[in-house]
């Protein structure tokens, strides 16, 4: 029979993401509706180390659904990864008689969640990260808002590019995943984009800009994933100097495409969550409570083909590593041939979708 839950804790950890506050609200209200008390942990796992827990009532989470960032605060806590820190965290949870934890964040957050569950605390993860880099889920909380923020800002850059016949290279966050980059490149009508998932042909990019400028195009946007930290500025110099040389050679200064570089950095993480993120956060938060109170642990909530469901937390971690090519020896030992084949199939689908989307983007950017 499932354990009787009296009190659970909720935390947000890792890079904040718009919609995290909405997820905390949903967790709190769903738990309270089922007669379970809720404690909010301040500042991610660090709050467990320093005993920074606050009770959350329905009123405490009122007026929070639209909040940016996370009102519970967030952090990346190295001490929590050490045994001493972990023990402190467990002591805090025991002191407050916490029966289970819902951890909202990305892959680092989920590693922390498994560390707690190994030590006897049931945990459920909720994917909250702008990067959308959890392979098992189609969507993460914050991804939609981050893309919207990029689009709003890049649209402004386009305005001034169009006036001056310039190029603007925009680097956006997303860690090792190109999801934000490819989608915002499509949505802003960029001429090119650079993502880790598909090879980038720099020569072809420069040639395309020259060709399109000759044809009369005035604004040029290129979206670059932060996975290539040097590339944006180098490309800016190359486009600028190549087109300038061409303008001199042909004695036509209209061919010079003056090029600027803009790193959007943490701007991408801020802002009020979109409708999509508020709804996703609400559904995922409420579902996480259902899972936990149903006696489940070591799962993350995912959205697959429009349905909110769950996946084994370790399976999803291995899947991520397989996708990124960072599997270590022995990591597949506990999985059957069928499970490994299922992982490979899921990854193949995702890669194929990326390749198709990238090819369509390239075709339409001419
Ligand atoms: O994972 C979210 C994210 O914003 C990434 O896109 C980015 O690489 C990283 O966090 C930045 O982390 P920090 O806020 O610690 O600089």
Image (spheres, grey):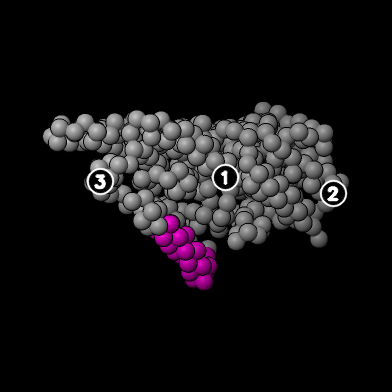
Q: Dot 1: within a 10 Å radius of its alpha carbon, few (fewer than 14), some, or many (20 or more) residues?
A: many
What are the residue bounds of the magenta stretch?
335-357
- Position of residue 290 measured from the top left corner of the image (x, y, whole percent): 76, 54
Tell whether label 3 touches label 1 (CB within 8 Å). no
Is residue 279 in view? yes
Residue depicted at 15% across the width and 32% down the height: 251
Q: In this view, does 193 lie to the left or right of 96?
A: left
How far across and how far down the image is residue 98, in percent? 76, 41
Question: Is 329 drawn above or below residue 53 in the view shown?
Answer: below
Disc sitting over residue 144 in the figure: 1
Decide: few, some or many residues near mark 3? Use Cα within 10 Å; few <14, some 14-19, many ≥20: some
Q: Can residue 55 be seen in this view?
A: no
Q: Residue at x 52, y 71 (%)?
A: 338
Would residue 153 appear left or right of 97 to someone viewing this image? left
Which mark is nearer the camera, 1 or 3?
A: 3
Name of the residue lying farthest toward the left: 249
């Amino acid at each position: 029979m499932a354990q009787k839950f009296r009190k659970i804790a909720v935390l947000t950890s890792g890079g904040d993401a718009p919609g995290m506050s909405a997820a905390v609200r949903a967790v709190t209200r769903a738990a309270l509706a089922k007669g379970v008390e809720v404690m909010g942990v301040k500042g991610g796992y660090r709050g467990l180390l320093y005993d920074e827990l606050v009770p959350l009532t329905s009123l405490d989470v009122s007026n929070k659904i639209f909040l940016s960032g996370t009102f519970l605060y967030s952090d990346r806590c190295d001490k929590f990864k050490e045994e001493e820190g972990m023990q402190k965290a467990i002591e805090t949870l025991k002191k407050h008689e916490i029966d289970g934890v819902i951890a909202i964040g990305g892959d680092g957050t989920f590693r922390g969640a498994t560390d707690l569950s190994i030590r006897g605390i049931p945990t459920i993860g909720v994917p909250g990260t702008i990067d959308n880099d959890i392979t098992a889920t189609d969507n993460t909380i914050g991804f939609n808002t981050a893309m919207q923020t990029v689009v709003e800002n890049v649209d402004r850059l386009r305005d001034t590019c169009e006036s001056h016949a310039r190029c603007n290279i925009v680097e956006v966050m997303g860690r090792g995943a190109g999801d934000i980059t490819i989608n915002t490149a499509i949505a802003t009508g960029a001429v090119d984009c650079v993502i880790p998932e598909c090879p980038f042909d720099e020569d072809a990019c420069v040639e395309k800009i020259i060709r399109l400028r000759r044809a009369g195009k005035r604004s040029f946007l290129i979206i670059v994933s932060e996975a290539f930290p040097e590339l944006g500025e180098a490309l800016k110099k190359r486009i600028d100097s190549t087109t300038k040389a061409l303008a001199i050679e042909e004695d036509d200064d209209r061919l010079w495409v003056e090029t600027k570089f803009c790193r959007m950095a943490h701007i991408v993480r801020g802002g009020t969550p979109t409708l999509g993120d508020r709804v996703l956060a609400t559904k995922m938060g409420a579902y996480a409570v259902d899972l936990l109170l149903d006696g489940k642990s070591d799962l993350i909530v995912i959205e697959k083909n429009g349905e909110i469901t769950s996946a084994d937390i370790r399976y999803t971690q291995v899947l991520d590593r397989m996708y990124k090519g960072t599997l270590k020896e022995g990591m597949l030992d506990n999985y059957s041939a069928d499970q490994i084949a299922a992982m490979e199939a899921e990854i193949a689908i995702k890669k194929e979708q990326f390749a198709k989307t990238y090819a369509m983007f390239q075709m339409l950017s001419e």
